[in-house]
Image (tube, rainbow, N blue to C red):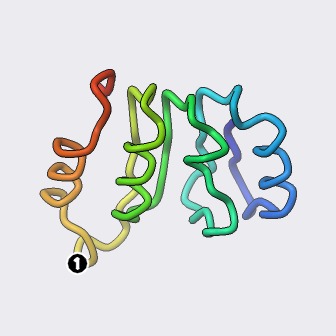
Amino acid sequence: LRHVGIYPNLENLGYFLEINGKNLLEFDIGAFHILPEIDLAKLCPNLKIYSMVDDVDDMRIIFKSCQQLESITVLVYELLLISEKKILEIVVSNSPKEFYE
């Protein structure tokens, strides 16, 4: 699922993911935060490719729950909030064994 443009309606997105999440292999809605109302890790356990904004806690949860994950793109806007080193440490210590990118 790719979404480019305006911020998605979270209610519709949540409903879509409830129905189709288990079948999704890729999730990318650009630079938008997914709010806690949508439990992406629970609804989309088979993700292989995921793009996210720099949320360290979400990153750990995604790695733990999405064991098929092969690739993640992390959009970092404020290096003052999270460092590249911190992101790499999380990848090394939390990524599933199939993860390569």
Q: Which residue lies furthest to the top in this view?
A: 98
Which of these two is toward me, 54 or 61? 61
User: In x, y percent, where is residue 81?
Assistant: 27, 77
Pointer 1: residues within 10 angstroms few (<14), some, or many (20+)?
A: few
Which of these two is toward me, 74 or 95? 95
Which of these two is toward me, 53 or 19? 19
Rendered position, 31 above or below 3: below
Identify the residue at horizontal 17%, vertical 42% (top origin).
92
Identify the residue at horizontal 45%, vertical 47% (top origin).
62
Mark 1: which amino acid? Leu
Identify the residue at horizontal 62%, vertical 39% (top origin).
44
Identify the residue at horizontal 60%, vertical 27% (top origin).
25
**Which quadrant would residue 95 be assigned to in this image?**
top left
Q: In what element is the residue under mark 1?
A: loop
**Which quadrant would residue 59 be assigned to in this image?**
bottom left
User: In x, y percent, where is residue 9?
Assistant: 82, 63
Q: Report which residue position mark 1 lands on.
A: 80
Q: Which residue lies furthest to the bottom in this view?
A: 80
Rendered position, 89 above or below 70: below
Question: How many numbered callouts?
Answer: 1
Rendered position, 81 above or below 37: below
Which of these two is toward me, 30 or 82? 82
User: In x, y percent, where is residue 1?
Assistant: 69, 36
Judged left or right of residue 38, residue 88 is: left
**Which quadrant would residue 101 be assigned to in this image?**
top left
Judged left or right of residue 80, residue 62 is: right
